[in-house]
Image (tube, rainbow, N blue to C red):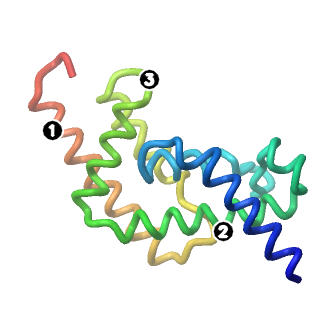
Amino acid sequence: MLNDFQSHQQILFDLTANYLEPLEGSYQRLAYLASLRDALTGRYEHSVLGSVYGADTVSQVISDCHEEVFERLLEMPLDVQGKELRAHLESLPGIFADNVMSCLQAGQQWMPPGAPSYLKELYSANLGVLLELLRHDKSKAGPDN
């Protein structure tokens, strides 16, 4: 049991230090973690960590981490969430307005499947409001944005 705990701690450290910390903000981290989830199986896959620690253990740790990042995002004030979402969308290739429009669908896929339904509802509501504010903000800025 202690070995399992130590293994989980090491995976979490490696995941955080090498893959999550270099990312800017909670939305980038949330999108990254969601991208590690196989849509067909529901398992999280990370080839590097999986080859070192084992796929099953890594999947569980990433799943737990995904839920933690999701919950911490929702603990932030809405204005901070908005700033982080804007920064994430501005970091993506393409036109900002297009990124805002495509984020509503993509953003729904960033939710961890094991999160409680009330948190999913809160996240969806927050995301919808923030995207509408970003869409409105950029439309006032002019056609070049």
Residue annotated with mark 3: 93
Where's residue 16, x and y in %?
61, 54
Residue at x-position 40% and y-position 31%:
91
Is 103 situated above or below 121?
A: above
- Of helix, strand and loop, which one carries label 1? helix
Q: Total marks drawn? A: 3
The amino acid type, in three-letter code, at marker 3 is Pro
Looking at the image, tell me whether mark 2 or mark 3 is earlier in sequence order: 2
Q: Residue furthest top?
A: 144
Residue at x-position 61% and y-position 50%:
17
Task: Choose between 24 and 10: the one closer to the eye.
Answer: 10
Residue annotated with mark 2: 64
- Which image quarter is the C terminus in? top left
Badge number at residue 14: none
Is 48 situated above or below 5?
A: above
- Which image quarter is the N terminus in? bottom right
The amino acid type, in three-letter code, at marker 2 is Asp
- Of helix, strand and loop, which one carries label 3? loop
Looking at the image, tell me whether mark 1 or mark 2 is earlier in sequence order: 2
Where's residue 129, x and y in %?
26, 56
The amino acid type, in three-letter code, at marker 1 is Asp
Badge number at residue 137: 1
Q: Residue furthest bottom?
A: 1
Measured in 3D between alpha carbons, the distance from the residue under mark 3 to the one under mark 1, in whole angstroms, is 19 Å
Comparing marks 1 and 2, which lies closer to the viewer? Answer: 2
Looking at the image, tell me whether mark 3 or mark 1 is earlier in sequence order: 3
